[in-house]
């Protein structure tokens, strides 16, 4: 089995999907998690590439965010669409990154992802609150590469 398949159990993946659903309840923002073994690219460049491959740049408000994890590299990145970048400060994702990193350092990957997803939802809520009639534009399932 690859590291990607060993990274999370099916139960842990279900808990993360539940966290995504919870995080998106109060924001029109769209959150996804993508896990793959390794990247030869710069981490943020690969996150941007995956973001586009997952068609996350097709949301109405351009407010999708991807939490990208390269398991074997022991690295992750957060990439937000241009609608987010236009309204938030440069260090907007720092607290979310710190939340994830604090859990990852001690091997609590599921908790790190869940807390990062929930934190991202809270951060997005301030700039992209949920509005009546908002629909879920992207899958909440974890994608793997």
Image (cartoon, rainbow, N blue to C red):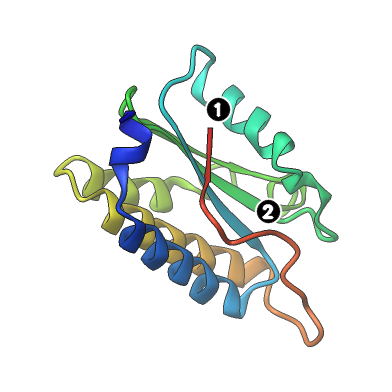
Give left or right: position of 78 versus 99: right
Task: Find disc 2 in the rendering and name its residue.
Answer: 64
At 72% across and 70% down in the image, what residue appears?
A: 136
Q: Nearer the viewer, residue 82 or 64?
A: 64
Disc sitting over residue 44 in the figure: 1
Q: Residue 57 in the image: x percent, y percent?
A: 78, 45
The image quarter containing residue 16 is bottom left
Q: Nearer the viewer, residue 1 or 112?
A: 1
Give left or right: position of 40 versus 5: right
Spot the residue most to the front. Answer: 1
Q: Is residue 49 above or below residue 57?
A: above
Q: What is the crowding at mark 1: few (fewer than 14 residues within 10 Å), some, or many (at least 20)?
A: some
Q: Secondary structure at mark 1?
A: helix
Gap in Å between the C-alphas at discs 2 and 1? 15 Å
Q: What is the crowding at mark 2: few (fewer than 14 residues within 10 Å), some, or many (at least 20)?
A: many
Q: Nearer the viewer, residue 7 or 78?
A: 7
| Marked residue nearer the N-terminal end (2 or 1) | 1
Q: Residue 131 in the image: x percent, y percent?
A: 76, 82
Could you tell me how many numbered marks the image carries? 2
């Amino acid at each position: 089995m690859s590291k990607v398949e060993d990274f999370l159990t099916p139960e842990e993946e279900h808990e993360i999907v539940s966290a995504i659903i919870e995080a998106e309840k109060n924001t029109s923002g769209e959150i996804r998690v993508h896990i793959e073994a390794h990247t030869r690219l710069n981490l943020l460049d690969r996150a941007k590439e995956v973001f586009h491959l997952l068609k996350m740049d097709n949301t109405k408000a351009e407010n999708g965010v991807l939490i990208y994890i390269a398991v074997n590299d022991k690295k992750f990145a957060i990439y937000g669409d241009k609608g987010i970048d236009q309204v938030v400060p440069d260090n907007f994702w720092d607290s979310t990154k710190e939340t994830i990193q604090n859990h990852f350092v001690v091997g609590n990957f599921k908790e790190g992802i869940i807390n990062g997803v929930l934190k991202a939802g809270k951060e997005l809520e301030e700039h992209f609150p949920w509005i009546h009639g908002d629909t879920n534009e992207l899958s909440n399932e974890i994608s793997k590469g």
